[in-house]
Image (cartoon, rainbow, N blue to C red):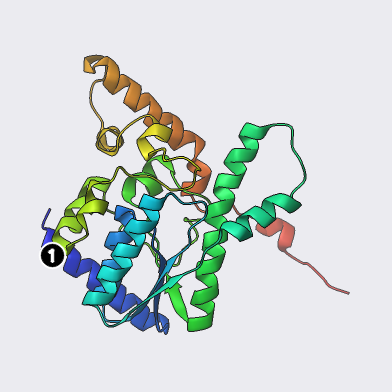
Amino acid sequence: MQVEKVIEHITNWLDTYVENSGAQGFVIGVSGGIDSAVTSVLGARTGRQLICVEMPIHQSANQVERAQRHSEFLQANFSNVTSIEVPMTNVFDELINVLPPVEDEAMRDMALVNTRARLRMTTLYYFAAYKNHLVLGTGNKVEDFGIGFFTKYGDGGVDLSPIADLTKTEVYALGHELGVNDTILEAPPTDGLWHDDRTDEDQIGASYPELEWAMEFRGDENALSEREREVLSIFRKLNSSNRHKMEPIPVCRIPDALLNNVSYR
């Protein structure tokens, strides 16, 4: 991959897009992870206004620190960047308090994990509406189009996706070139939505390099190792079960014959 040219291409694409949209700039959620770090630097490189929003919800201290250090890095290097922290733990807890009790705590936990992401999406669009900005997506190719590892109308609720055609490995390559902090480059990828420090690999059961391989695999399955078959099974299961998140919302199309000669009284 021609890293420098990819960076230039995405930066120009972002600049052209916002110019044609009539918006004044971008807003992005900064989590302390590699995807939001790279995307925010790319947005900053356009010279357009960029609002970086930190939205901790019961976040571990190391995640908060990485996000803060990255915001400081952006502001030190780009005069067009504004950083805002919106603590959301109390908001999240108050929502839990008014929700009805449930019997299945495991399902409730998963629902609340996705609720965190949707609260953050709502917050980002508040700033986007107030400032006439566009919300930058931070999903990569494997997450957005391979296994659907994102929250529908959460971190998947965005206006444009600058790095969605890049694998996680390629995103890391951009991060190194863009000067992203080593603590972010070295931290295990995590969505930061759980109370503990579980990583993406803990949740998925496979690493990103393994998933990238599975996404491109077209060979003879009989020649695969036991681990390769396991990874391929994980990928295919998630690709199938999360297909509803990766495809356009279904629209019920009405046959022309049912719409012809409609009269209104």
Residue 93 lies, with reference to residue 107, above or below; the image says below
* Depth order, front residue of 133/56: 56
Q: Position of residue 45 (x, y in %)?
A: 23, 74
Which residue, as the protein is rendered here, is positioned at the far right? 265
Residue 217 lies, with reference to residue 195, above or below; the image says above
Asked whether residue 162 appears in the rendered view, the answer is no
Q: Position of residue 111 (x, y in %)?
A: 61, 43
Q: Position of residue 36 (x, y in %)?
A: 34, 59
* Depth order, front residue of 225/181: 181
Q: How crowded is mark 1: few (under 14 residues within 10 Å), some or many (20 or more)?
A: few
Q: Where is residue 67 in the image (x, y as percent from the top left)?
A: 35, 60
In the image, what residue occupies the spot 38% across and 46% down?
Answer: 143
Which residue is label 1 attached to?
5
Position of 118 compared to 15: left or right?
right
In the image, what residue occupies the spot 68% across and 50% down?
Answer: 96
Q: Quadrant of the C terminus?
A: bottom right
The image quarter in which residue 83 lies: bottom left
Q: What element carries label 1?
A: helix
Position of 237 compared to 43: left or right?
right
Residue 28 lies, with reference to residue 19, above or below; the image says above
The image quarter in which residue 209 lies: top left
* Depth order, front residue of 201/138: 201
Residue 65 lies, with reference to residue 146, above or below; the image says below
Asked whether residue 176 appears in the rendered view, the answer is yes
Amino acid tagged 1:
Lys
* Depth order, front residue of 43/142: 43
In the image, what residue occupies the spot 40% across and 61% down?
Answer: 137
